[in-house]
Amino acid sequence: MWYVIQTLGGEEERTADMIRKKISSCYIKECFIPKRERMKKFCGQWNRVEEILFPAYIFVVTDKPEELYQELRRVPRLTKVLGREEEYFVPLSEEEERLVSRLGGQEHRASLSKVVIGEGKRICVLEGPLKNYVGDVVRVNLHKREVVVRVAFMGKETELRLGIEMVREEKIIK
């Protein structure tokens, strides 16, 4: 089962490394930070960069949540385990696990979605993680080459920023 740990923003990598080093692999199957690719302009050139998809969160996969919870108390910088109720914490739902998996695959990295831009900034997704979420698009920011989608996650509506790559501009014919 998948669990989410909250940490300080900007400390995700360092905290995940501490978890991997201080906690035995018998308690953790995987510890990861979902990422996203996006395009960013440096010195007039578009470059592919990687950023954290869920800032301030670390994901762990375990079959021993009670033991893991006790072990996590040894990790400094840990803010809190999300979904904690009394002496245990609650896993992500199967639907939430599928959401994170669909976005990032086995590498937990949401690649760029290839899109065609039509009239009125209307986007047509050709391939990539956005293909499943076109109906939930909140904003399209062509200048930053990203799309904001709204998803249900951890019992609330969350906005995720996903990178896009514009393949060509032309009218979208219905």
Image: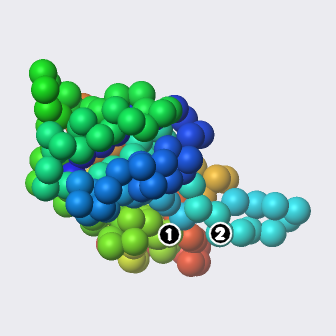
Mark 1 = which residue? 112
- Type of amino acid at the residue the image marks with label 1: Leu
Q: In screen coordinates, is 67 left or right of 50?
A: left
**Residue 115, how many percent across, how many down?**
48, 71
Q: Is residue 57 above or below residue 41?
A: above
The numbered mark at residue 48 is 2
The numbered mark at residue 58 is none
State which tag comes first along the sequence, 1 or 2: 2
- The residue located at (56%, 78%) in the rendering is 167
* Closest to the observer, 131 or 36: 36
Is residue 157 something one can see in this rendering?
no
Location of residue 67 (image quadrant): top left
Q: In screen coordinates, is 60 left or right of 128?
A: left
**Residue 125, how many percent across, how many down?**
40, 70
**Residue 18, how many percent across, how many down?**
48, 48
| Quarter placement of the C terminus | bottom left
**Residue 65, how many percent across, how many down?**
16, 44
- The residue located at (29%, 33%) in the rendering is 81
Q: In screen coordinates, is 87 left or right of 61?
A: left
* Colour mapping used in the image: rainbow
Are circles 1 and 2 on residues that touch, CB within 8 Å? Answer: yes
| Quarter placement of the N terminus | bottom left
Identify the residue at the far top of this view. Answer: 86
- Type of amino acid at the residue the image marks with label 2: Arg
Classify mark 1: residues with Cα within 10 Å, few (<14), some (14-19) or many (20+).
many
* C-alpha distance separating marks 1 and 2: 9 Å
Q: In screen coordinates, is 130 left or right of 167?
A: left
Say what secondary structure mark 1 lies in.
loop
Is residue 42 something one can see in this rendering?
yes
Say what secondary structure mark 2 lies in.
strand
* Closest to the observer, 4 or 30: 30
- The residue located at (14%, 50%) in the rendering is 64
